[in-house]
Amino acid sequence: MVDCLKIAIFVAARSGSVQGALLPASLPAGCNLDSENEMASNGPNEYVVKMPRIHPDFYLRAEWHDYASRCFYMITVNKSADAPVLSAVKGEITPQGTVARTELTPTGVIVENALKRIKEHYPFVEIGRIAIMPDHVHFMVFVKLAGKIQLGEVVRIFKKESSVYYKELFPESPIAKRGGSLFVDGFNDRIVYKQGQLDRFKRYVLDNPRRYYLRVSHPRFFNCCRNISLNGEVYSVYGNFMLLSHPIREFVKVSRRFTAEELQRRMEAWNETIRGAGVLISPFIAPKEKEVMRAGIERGASIIRIVENGFPERYKPEGDWFDLCAEGRLLIIAPVNFNSRRERIKREQCVAMNELAERIANEEVSDLKCKNWRT
């Protein structure tokens, strides 16, 4: 999962005008994006932002959302092909875990300064934490006043100023000679629409150097078959286990008991997850669940698939599943034991698999232990 260029912009959603009642009417006053536990203790008024890893279309926007509202967003922007790297990621694996940090290049310093100058143009826009990666950038921003500016204008000013300062300092660079930009056209946005994830996304931004270091330096971590302990319960897994801590995770279940309104609400959440290239989690048994899964794969989402049987010796996914795993977009979770005799899946197994999928989508994985690694 070597990420596309991301700018995590968190702009606080407070208008309450989103269709489907996905957002409450107001956010708590006095937001401080630099607070470690911001919004964590605000009870029912807690808000969350979704952060994508890869986005298939940097021009796609949420039709249901007012981009001039007072709102939290996460933005993704790619470095252009001929732009210098923005940072170097240095890290090491220690007995206490993996640690990593970024060291900014001169171009990365220009980008960081441009982010910090946004407030000079828009006093009602507050920049929070920043993580500048070699080929992408994360930052958090709080737009305090509704109706003052479109989100795209904030991103445009940032990209323009970064490029202008870069070309002034490096007039002989390819970008300066062609009159181009440090960044590719367009951007991806993530919108606050679900409670309980703001701290998750803060951690994601801060943890990005470590994740990047692991992906680049240790690709075997992303296609190993292993036994893994999740919050005290042991399973076998195959694929990218870091999807378990991806900031955009959504449980997929379709039931005949759902009302039309409930199904519509869930469809909106699944589409928003797919739009942000998040993770869809399910056994994907029902035909409608498989339709959601196929749509997610086609449009750049990742999949955590819960299966009823363990892995045979020397197991590897086949066909499209193999390609999806090689891209870092698949994690298969299975029982530890493998049953060589094919049996029809039982209702209690379906219930247990759905319960596991729902827990993974809605809870943090607090006890992640791997053993018996097999490449």
Image (cartoon, rainbow, N blue to C red):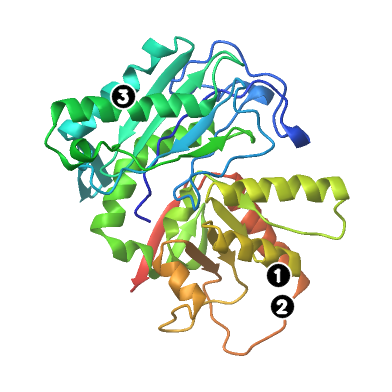
- The Cα–Cα distance between marks 1 and 2, rounded to whole angstroms, is 10 Å
Residue placed under numbered mark 3 in the picture:
161
Q: Which residue lies at the image location 57% right of the left edge and 13% below the top edge?
A: 145
**Amino acid found under the numbered disc labelled 1:** Ile
> From the viewer's perspective, is residue 171 above or below residue 282?
above
Counting from the top left corner in percent of width and height, residue 93 is at 22, 51
Q: Is residue 353 left or right of residue 185?
A: right
Front residue of 123 and 39: 123
Q: Which residue lies at the image location 72% right of the left edge and 83% below the top edge?
A: 344
- The Cα–Cα distance between marks 1 and 3, rounded to whole angstroms, is 50 Å
Is the residue marked by circle 3 packed among few (<14), some (14-19), or many (20+) residues within 10 Å? many
**Amino acid found under the numbered disc labelled 2:** Ile
Residue placed under numbered mark 1 in the picture:
285
Is the residue marked by circle 2 packed among few (<14), some (14-19), or many (20+) residues within 10 Å? few
**Count of numbered marks:** 3
- The Cα–Cα distance between marks 3 and 2, rounded to whole angstroms, is 58 Å
Counting from the top left corner in percent of width and height, residue 286 is at 74, 68
Counting from the top left corner in percent of width and height, residue 360 is at 58, 52
Counting from the top left corner in percent of width and height, residue 137 is at 34, 37
Q: Which mark is residue 345?
A: 2
Q: Quadrant of the C terminus?
A: bottom left
Task: Kindly indicate whether the residue at mark 2 contacts the one at mark 1 (C-beta within 8 angstroms).
Answer: yes
Mark 1 vs mark 2: which is more N-terminal? 1
> From the viewer's perspective, is residue 156 above or below residue 253?
above
Q: Which residue lies at the image location 51% right of the left edge and 55% below the top edge?
A: 232
Front residue of 256 and 153: 153
> From the viewer's perspective, is residue 58 above or below residue 150?
below
